[in-house]
Amino acid sequence: MASEGEISLLVVVVDVNPIWWGQHAQSEPEFTLSKCLDAVMVMGNAHMAMTRTNQLAVIAAHCQDSHFLYPSKRLKGNDDTSSSRDGKYELLSVTNNLIAEEIRDIMSKTELTGNSTDTLLAGSLAKALCCILLKTVVFLLAQEIKSRILVIKAADDCALQYMNFMNVIFAAQKQNILIDACVLDSDSGLLQQACDITGGLYLKIPQKVALAQYLLWVFLPDSEQRSLLVLPPPAHVDYRAACFCHRTLIEIGYVCSVCLSIFCNFSPICTTCETAFKIQLPQMVKPKKKKPKLPA
Amino acid sequence: MASLSEEVLLVVKKVRQKKQDGTLYLMAERIAWGPEGKDRFTVSHSYSDIRCQKISPDGKAKVQLQLVLHTGESTTFHFANESTSRKDWEAAKELLQQLLPKFKKKANKELEEKNKMLQEDPVLFQLYKDLVVSQVISAEEFWANRLGGINNGESAACENKQEVGISGAFLADIRPQTDGCNGLRYNLTADIIESIFRTYPAVKQKYKENVPHNLTEKEFWTRFFQSHYFHRDRISTGTQDIFSECARQDEKGLKSLVTQGVKNPMVDLLSLEDKTLDEGYGISSALPSTSHASRTVKESSNFAIIKRFNHHSAMVLAAGSRKRDVPADQASETSSTDGNSRDSDFFQPPLKKVKLQEAIEYEDLQQENRPKTVALNLKKSDRYAHGPVPLQSQQYTTSQDIINSVNYIKHEMSNYKPNLTQVLSSAAASSAIAALSPGGVLMQQVAQQAINQMVPTEIQAELKHLYVAAGELLRHFWTCFPVNTAFLEEKLTGHLECMLQAAYSKFHIWQTRRMMRKT
């Protein structure tokens, strides 16, 4: 349990890429976006119900932009929220209703621009970091605040977001914010790196239907409690670099000593900085070996 | 018999050693004892081997002298001569006392150095224990490479030692105490005496002149404290005091100090004076005149005290900046009581220039003189911005697919209502739990434990020591290459072989012992 007065903030970033969800809903009708959001709500309720000081934020990552599902701007304008009839803790019912309203709103406003079909995950993560920062500042004088981000990922990685993603990851690491990842479909190298660098958990779920169970079991406890539990071990992360000429991942390559660009084949002139390498003719050119990083 | 080149310093007859009568000889470099009537020495120790000497207390009938060696052995000599035993014994003791310290330092230094090295570095100590104590390597080989810097290190250490300055209050430390019966006790330690000599070279000169010919040390210091030179109200009345000469020299020194002035052009001493604002804000009396006659008695005594304080401070500062090994030229010492050595006179103009420059110029505002570098010229810098392309196969979707998907999801979510009671079926939940429990699909690697958690720490530590020792042996092996000399060849084939054998057998013993313990 969190110690007296310690605030734990959980930010859930849900990938609501309509293209991916639409495709998969047709092939797997038993697990749809609605079910996914239900599972997220269950976990959010559980988090808020554990301690009064726990905070929640939910962000939807769309392919056009990213929205805050909770807390949303509707929060202030709504005085006529219907009180739930089943005697639920009012905060939870308000939260659930807000999230449902917001997602309906977002999905109805989806427009096809045809350019981007990838989820803007880096942007959502950046928004999550800002939200955490805001809450940290607000609560700074009062108590300690511990935050973590949970990413529920559906669609594939977008290679164009690489730099932004890495910046976000390192910013989170500096702020001691964990990034957890719950991957529904295919492994994501970027998220694996994110979890490895920040110290979070990466899990690829074998059964999407049991998403709620996985969320509650693995991702609900915070970092202190995780050390006491037996959880899935960290996965092997592929830290290989990509060569600058073909963008393929290589284990052994050539590195220019001036600009540090990586090549898979030797060439006498570096194409990035145009340095000429002097070769000693009688000897064979020895490739500068780069050892791949393999975790123990 | 003693070689002819050895100088015999003392011969004591009728000295018994181990119940045998004989003669004790003290030579320049060793002490030896030979039995009566024989020519040879049966016992001979060089002074560097002797750690200390022990004497029997005064009251005992037996007059004995015991020599304790570094190795722990001891030899006892009994001075049996009835009439002169005491005197002989004292003579021998004093001579030994003088000779031993000279030889002691040489041998001890090496040992001390070794001990220090072993104490500072626990890894080295452990290595020493593993290899030398268990006789895998001999001690000389162990220290062969490590003590290379002893002779060089010595002088370097001396250079790095900081000189101890002089406390300005050393005279105050003397602190006279009443003796009870109208006398005063002054406590003089060696430090205070040294400070006095360093600060006032004139006193040192007087000391050298008078002690021990005319006065004993005690008398010298008694006179020193009694003289007016020491006391506050220094009135040079021209008495027969040996220190009146010092007083005159001090006056001269002070005058030359004043005339020399301060070398720093930024400091203007003459502008400092006691300023008065108004009545009650300071001394509103007239400026003190410098002529003797118009001064009152009180003013003149204040003047004298202030002069003495200034002089004392100047001398302390001068003594601190003077180097320790001052040349034995006494004349230069006494003439430099003004506090500045002669050399500094030559440096006056450049020093002034340096001070002026320091005040005018700022280092940061100067042009930077960095070495010339070549600028980095990147043609295609956007290459750094891209990450690795994922290896997954690209899934191509037609635009029709996309439109269909989006419409489907829009339709689905338009009627979205959270239905939290039907989120999870028990079958799904139990299969998920099974997958997450140890042994499940996701938990395959948890069973592997790190080796360092399974092996207890003492075994780890012992293994580490063995490993370091093996590394040391390897180092010895590799230093034999290239095999240039016959010595190295012999070492390789013979000596090293048995070293490695000894090491291997030691490891084997450890291994079996450990395994026995387990089972």
Image (cartoon, coloured by chain):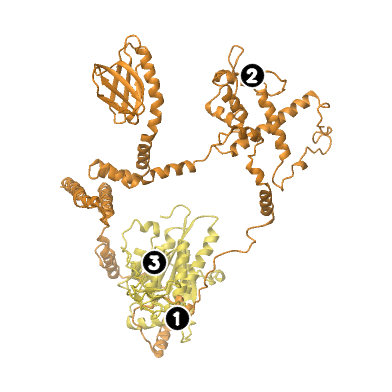
The chain that hosts pointer 1 is B
Q: Nearer the viewer, residue A201 or B86?
A: B86
Q: Is label 3 or label 2 in front?
A: 2
Mark 1 or 2, nearer chain start = 2
Residue A195 badge: 3
Say left or right for B395 vs A82.
Answer: left
Q: Position of residue B309 (x, y in %)?
A: 68, 31
Characterize the local packing of mark 3: few (<14), some (14-19) or many (20 or more) Cα atoms within 10 angstroms: many
Q: Residue at x 45, y 81 (%)?
A: B414
The chain that hosts pointer 3 is A
Where B393 sits versus B40, above or below? below
Q: Position of residue B16 (x, y in %)?
A: 27, 16
> Disc 3 on helix, strand or loop?
helix
Q: Nearer the viewer, residue B312 or A281?
A: A281
Q: Are marks 3 and 1 in contact (CB under 8 Å)?
A: no
Q: Amino acid at mark 1?
A: Ser
Q: Which chain is yellow?
A: A
Q: Could you tell me how far apart the alpha carbons at marks 3 and 1 are, in whole angstroms?
A: 34 Å
Chain B representation colour: orange
Q: Quadrant of the N terminus of chain A?
A: bottom left
Q: Quadrant of the C terminus of chain A?
A: bottom left
Question: Quick check: do tags 3 and 2 share a chain?
Answer: no
Q: Position of residue B187 (x, y in %)?
A: 56, 22
Question: Quick check: do tags 1 and 2 share a chain?
Answer: yes
The chain that hosts pointer 2 is B
> Disc 1 on helix, strand or loop?
helix
Say left or right for B371 vs A12.
Answer: right
Q: Amino acid at mark 3?
A: Cys
Q: Residue at x 49, y 82 (%)?
A: A109
Which residue was labeled with disc 1?
A: B414
Q: Are marks 3 and 2 in contact (CB under 8 Å)?
A: no
Residue B226 badge: 2
